[in-house]
Image (cartoon, rainbow, N blue to C red):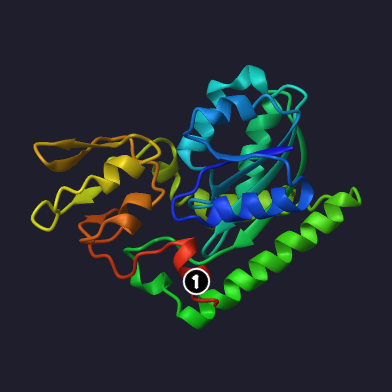
Amino acid sequence: MNAIYLSGTGNSKHAATLLLNCLDPDGRAVPIESEDALAVLESEELIIAYPTQFSNIPYMVREFINKHGDSWKGKKVFLITTMGLFSGDGTGCAARLLRKYGAVITGGLQIKMPDSVCDCKALKKTAEQNNGIIKEADRRITEAAKLMKEGKYPQEGLSVFAHLAGLFGQRLWFYNKTTGYTDKLKIDTARCIGCGLCANNCPAQNLKIVDGKPVASDHCTMCYRCISKCPKQAITLLGKEVYEQASYERYANELS
């Protein structure tokens, strides 16, 4: 078993890696944007992990599934979605698409993690709250692994009820935000120091450095990785100001 993940601030990477290590310590967990993802895609059994965006799949994940449609037939796929607030049928969205290509969906797991939306103050939590969220996430993932070893696969987000919750709870209201990549990434060039961290870390190659400053195109996958890593907090997406930069590593360190 191997795993492929899209992870902006490290939540989905951690969830995929932890579950994989519990099930198959020899397996590989690789980011979706890496060349290694194509090699891992040859596995007969896969974990796919990604953050839920408005109860939907990040467009980069949808594009990856569609681009490699011929590779999914007969593959056993377990889906993990991470969320800060509400997931609905985050796993179900990918499950329905993968089934069209002949994949066998073994189950789904929807895990609450520290919120990664850096430019929305209402979603921020205290260090103590984030500590509790991570501990509960790890407990749920390890418990799921025990059940899966017994052949009992969680089915979170795959039911008709979950489909309706995701559809009417968020997807219909925010449909335009998830039908493609976004061009809403904003860069404050006055604050930017041209370090290049944003361009070097963007999984969608949406950013490039021109004349010492980053320039964004219309290919943003809304992962928040560049916003979380910018040393001058010069990048925003949904909001107008960075209130707190997020990363799984930071919150995990706060546990110790």
Residue sitting at 42 percent across and 70 percent down? Answer: 123
Q: Could you tell me residue 72's position as x and y percent?
A: 68, 24
Nearest the eye: 103 or 250: 250
As drawn, 131 above or below 59: below
Q: Mark 1 falls on what kind of element? A: helix
Q: Quadrant of residue 110?
A: bottom right
Residue behind mark 1:
253
As drawn, 252 above or below 30: below
Residue sitting at 40 percent across and 35 percent down? Answer: 180
Residue sitting at 55 percent across and 30 percent down? Answer: 36
* Relative to 182, 105 lies left or right: right
As drawn, 101 above or below 62: above
* Relative to 256, 234 lies left or right: left
Q: Could you tell me residue 93's position as x and y percent?
A: 61, 41
Q: How many marks?
A: 1
Amino acid beneath label 1: Asn
Q: Could you tell me residue 237's position as x and y percent?
A: 29, 53
Nearest the eye: 157 or 139: 139
Residue sitting at 51 percent across and 63 percent down? Answer: 84
Q: Could you tell me residue 88's position as x and y percent?
A: 61, 55
Nearest the eye: 89 or 29: 29
The 10 Å Cα crowd at callout 1, few under 14, some 14 to 19, many 20 or more, is: few
Q: Residue furthest top?
A: 70
Nearest the eye: 138 or 165: 138
Residue 168 appears in view: no
| Quadrant including the N terminus | top right
